[in-house]
Image (cartoon, rainbow, N blue to C red):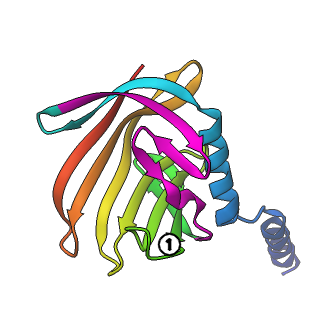
């Protein structure tokens, strides 16, 4: 009986000493910090079916917007964010966050965001319209190491027909050094 009490006490102490999970703000701060350190010019292309558009891609922070060429991720600065759960994206353990739009000026009412727990990298983003229907998904397909740092190699961008989960268009952002 005494051994059981000691085991329960040790488990309780172990649980209390474990660090609480980070807040959504802390996770987003780490994403923005990671992105701000990776300002580099890369060569790439946007590919949709047989069409390829070569482009020079600059990944950088412009004011309060993380940009990859013409893709701007303004939602990383929305004030309303919360951690929903922990989930895997491919083989990576991620935090799943929900960010709500501050106004109707955005095409998205909310965005679900998966952030790699180990690196702070964005792994997947889903944008929902004002009727809570999925309209766009960005997902990292692969990464590459350049100058000792990890960068995007390929990202899939899917446009959905709202309310049906039917993919209307699929494109790939592919980065080559």
Can residue 108 be seen here? The reply is yes
Q: Position of residue 143 (x, y in %)?
A: 44, 33
Residue position marked by numbered label 1 in the rendering: 101
Q: Secondary structure at mark 1?
A: loop
Q: How many marks?
A: 1
Q: Is residue 151 left or right of residue 165?
A: right
Q: Position of residue 39 (x, y in %)?
A: 58, 31
Residue under the image location 40 percent in, 46 percent down: 71
Q: Nearer the viewer, residue 31 or 70?
A: 70
**Which portion, as a residue range, is magenta?**
52-81
Q: Nearer the viewer, residue 111 or 148?
A: 111
Residue under the image location 57 percent in, 66 percent down: 78
Where's the N terminus, which quadrant? bottom right
Where's the C terminus, which quadrant? top left
Residue under the image location 88 percent in, 78 percent down: 2
The answer to whether residue 65 is magenta is: yes
In the image, residue 131 sits, relative to residue 141, either above or below, namely below
Q: Position of residue 62 (x, y in %)?
A: 58, 44
Which secondary structure is most common in the magenta stretch? strand
Q: Position of residue 85 (x, y in %)?
A: 54, 68
Residue under the image location 40 percent in, 48 percent down: 90
Q: Is residue 153 left or right of residue 118?
A: left
Label 1 packing within 10 angstroms: few (<14), some (14-19), many (20+): many
Q: Quadrant of residue 161?
A: bottom left
In the image, residue 105 sits, relative to residue 67, either above or below, namely below
Q: Quadrant of residue 149?
A: top right
């Amino acid at each position: 009986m005494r051994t059981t009490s000691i085991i329960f006490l040790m488990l309780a102490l172990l649980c209390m000493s474990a660090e609480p999970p980070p807040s959504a703000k802390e996770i987003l701060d780490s994403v923005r910090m990671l992105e701000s350190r990776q300002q580099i010019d890369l060569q790439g292309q946007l590919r949709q079916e047989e069409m390829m558009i070569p482009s020079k891609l600059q990944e950088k922070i412009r004011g309060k917007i993380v940009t990859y060429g013409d893709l701007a991720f303004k939602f990383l600065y929305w004030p309303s964010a919360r951690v929903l759960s922990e989930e895997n994206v491919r083989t990576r353990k991620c935090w799943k966050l929900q960010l709500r739009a501050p106004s109707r000026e955005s095409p998205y009412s909310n965005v679900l965001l998966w952030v790699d727990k180990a690196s702070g990298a964005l792994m997947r983003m889903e944008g929902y319209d004002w009727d809570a229907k999925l309209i766009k998904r960005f997902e990292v397909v692969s990464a590459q190491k350049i100058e000792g740092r990890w960068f995007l190699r390929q990202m899939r961008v899917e446009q959905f027909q709202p309310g049906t989960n039917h993919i209307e268009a699929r494109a790939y952002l592919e980065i080559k050094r």
